Amino acid sequence: MKFKFLIYLLLPLLFSAVYAQDYSSSITIYPKEITVSQCGIATYDLSVKNTGIKEDTLYALVEGIPEGWYSLSHESIKLKPGESKNVYLFVTANCFEEPKNYTAKISFLGNSESYAEFKMNVVSDHSISILVPSEIRSCACEETPIKFVLANTGKYEEKVKLTVKGGYVKQDVINLKPGEQSQFEMVLEKSCNSYGNYTFEINAESMTSYAKTSKKITINRENCHDFQIKYDEVKNLCLNEKATFSVSIYNTGTLDDEYLLYIDALDISEKVNISSKSNKTFNLVFESDEVGVIDLGFSVKSSTKESKGMIRFNIEKCYGVDLQAEQNEITILLGDGRLVKAKLTNTGSKNDTFRIISDVKWVSLRPEQIRVEGMKSEDIFIYYSPEYNQLGVFNTTIKAFSENSKDEESIKVNVVSELPIIQPEENASTTTTLQQSEGVSNKTLIALGVGILITIFIFGMIYLFVMRD
C-alpha cells in the first residue's frame, strides 16, 4: 500500500518534469489605463517573471506610443528560472500634439515572448479650437471676408496669436478666458485665377502656453463675376442705309451683376443689370454716308473685368442710277415725231428695277420699266410727237427711279411750223466756185495734152510705113 501511495504521490511531479518548458515568461502591468494632461507623465509598473526552467535574457519593445515619448528603466533584463523583476515605463504626453487616446503594447522578447497591453488617454489643460462655418461662399476676383470662432477649451486663460496662409485677419491676437469663445474675421485674398477648390490654412497658437491648433479648409471659389460677349464681327451694308447690329452680354457668373456697354463713336453708354446665367441683347443701328470700311470699337465693363470688341462695317454703294440722253436739244416740225436714244446705268452693286416717266404727255417711252443688273447699262428710247398747234420751246424732263435711287435728264424740245432754210455762206460759195473752175481747167489741159500725143503717134506711124515703101 505504501508503495502504491508513493507512486500516486510522485506521478504529478513526473508529468510536470516531462512537460515543463525550458523558456517561458509572463508580464503584469499596473495600471492598465492612465489619463494624463499634455506635458504630463504617465508611469506604468511592470513585473516580468521567468516562468521557464532555464535562464533567459529578455529585451523590451514598446509599440503604439510615438518614439521619443517614453523611457524604460530597463531596456533588457536577465532572469533566472522562477525569478521576477520590476520594470518601469515612463511616458510624457507631448505638449504640442493634439490630445489623443493611445492603445499600446509592451513586449519582452528573448527565447520566450510575452506582452501586456495598456492605454494612455491624453487630455489638455491648455487647449484651443477653431470652429468653422457650415457654409462658406467665396468669389474669385474679390476679397472674401469669412467669420470663424476661436474657443478656449482648456482650464487656463490663453493669449492666442492667429496667422493665415492664403489670407489675413484683421485682429491677429485674441485673449480668451477658460470656456470663452470669440469671433474673428478672416479675409480671403483676391485671386482671379483660382476658380474651383481653393485651400487655405488658419493657425492659432497660444503665446502663454503650449496650446495650439490649425485648420486646413478647402472651399469652392465660385466664378461669381464673369461674362461673355457675342456680336457680329463683320456687317455688310449699303450706303445711307440703316443697318441693325447687336451686342449680347451673357452673365456666366453665379451672382447678378451690373454691366456698362460703351460705344464712343455712336455716343452710346448703356447700363444694365443681368441676373446670373442670363443675357441681355442690345439692338443698335449704324448708318454711314461714306463708302468704305469702318471699324467700330466698343467695350463692356462689369464690377471685376472689361472686355472689348470690334465690328467691321463694309459699306458699299448698293443703289444708284444715271440717265444720259444722246441729245439734250431737238427740233421737231409740227406734225412730225423725233426719236431720242438714252442710256440708263445702274451705278449700284445690286440689281434694281427702274421706272421711266416724262413730264409731258406727247412722248412715248420704251421700256417704261426695266430691271438692270448692278453696274450694267440698258438702252432707253424716247419718242416725241407734239400735239396739234403746240408750237414753241418746251423744257422736258425724263426721270428714271426705283425705291432706292432716282435720276433725271432734261431735254429741250423746239416745235416749229416749218423747218428753216439753211443759206450757204458767201465765202464758202466763192471758194466752191473757184475750186470748180480750177477743176475744169485742169481737166481741159489734160484732155488737150492727151489729144496732141495721140496725133503725134498717128502721124509717126504713117510716116514710117509710107517712107519705107
Image (cartoon, helix red, strand yellow):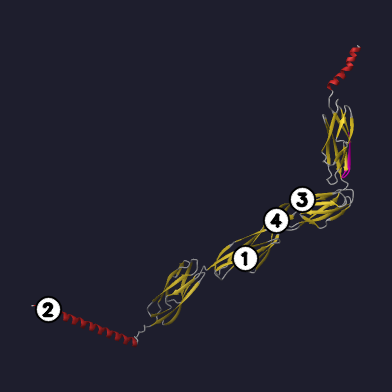
Which residue was labeled with disc 2? 464
Which residue in the structure is indicated by mark 1? Answer: 297
* Magenta residues, start to end: 37-46
Please name the amino acid that badge 3 sits on: Ile
Label 2 to label 1, Cα distance in Å? 112 Å
Image disc number at residue 366: none
Q: Amino acid at mark 2?
A: Leu
Q: Give the secondary structure at mark 2.
A: helix
Q: Badges 1 and 3: C-beta atoms under 8 Å apart?
A: no
Q: Residues within 10 Å of mark 1 (few under 14, many from 20)?
A: some
- Mark before the other along the chain sequence, 4 or 1: 4
Q: Main secondary structure of the magenta part?
A: strand
Figure check: 191 above or below 95 = below
| Contact? badges 4 and 2 (CB < 8 Å) | no
| Amino acid type, residue under disc 1 in the picture | Gly
SS of the residue at dot 1? strand
